[in-house]
Image (cartoon, rainbow, N blue to C red):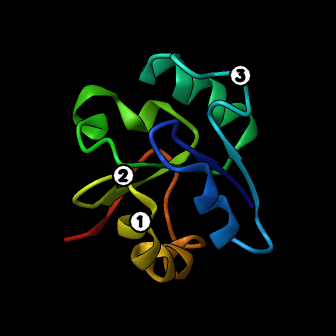
Amino acid sequence: MKLLLDECIDRKLAREFPGYEVKTVPQMGWAGVKNGQLLTLAAADFDVFITVDRNLSFQQNLPAFDIAVIILKVPSNRLVDLKPLIPQVLAILFTVTKGQATVIGA
């Protein structure tokens, strides 16, 4: 399974997904690409897009994209706030649905 971390997420979070192929938006050369185009690019190569952008599901027509989206609801995008959600993310990775957003966190 291939995971893409949004550019606003600390790249060190990729270490928390052993056994998965994880890339970041900047590693793919997509930094600064707007969400609609980013989701189109991501859907061609990835299974799941992980972000902290809570507005994504309101701004984009997610069913139009062949990628599952996980939105991490955290107080900040700092690693210390993101890491506690990783067990929940790992638990749902194989049940998320492409074209839908799943929100994890408070």
**Vertical order, 73 against 56 (above or below):** below
Crowding at mark 1 (Cα within 10 Å: few <14, some 14-19, many 20+): some
Q: Earlier in the sequence, mark 2 or mark 1?
A: 2
How far across and down, in percent of the image, does residue 56 sit? 31, 36
SS for callout 2: loop
Q: Quadrant of residue 81?
A: bottom left
Crowding at mark 2 (Cα within 10 Å: few <14, some 14-19, many 20+): some
Residue sitting at x 19%, y 71%: 106
How far across and down, in percent of the image, does residue 102 sit? 36, 60
**Vertical order, 91 against 73 (above or below):** below
Q: Are marks 2 and 1 in contact (CB under 8 Å)?
A: yes
Q: Amino acid at mark 2?
A: Asn
Total of numbered circles in the picture?
A: 3
Alpha carbons under labels 2 and 1: distance apart: 7 Å
Q: Nearer the viewer, residue 105 or 44?
A: 105
Q: Quadrant of residue 71?
A: bottom left
Q: Amino acid at mark 1?
A: Leu
How far across and down, in percent of the image, does residue 54 sit? 25, 44
**Which quadrant of the rendered structure holds the N terminus?**
bottom right
Q: Nearer the viewer, residue 7 or 99?
A: 7
Q: Amino acid at mark 3?
A: Gly
Alpha carbons under labels 1 and 3: distance apart: 23 Å
What residue is disc 2 on? 77
| Left-right relation of 59 to 67 | left
What residue is disc 3 on? 29
What residue is disc 1 on? 82
Residue sitting at x 62%, y 58%: 12
SS for callout 1: helix
Q: Which mark is residue 98?
A: none
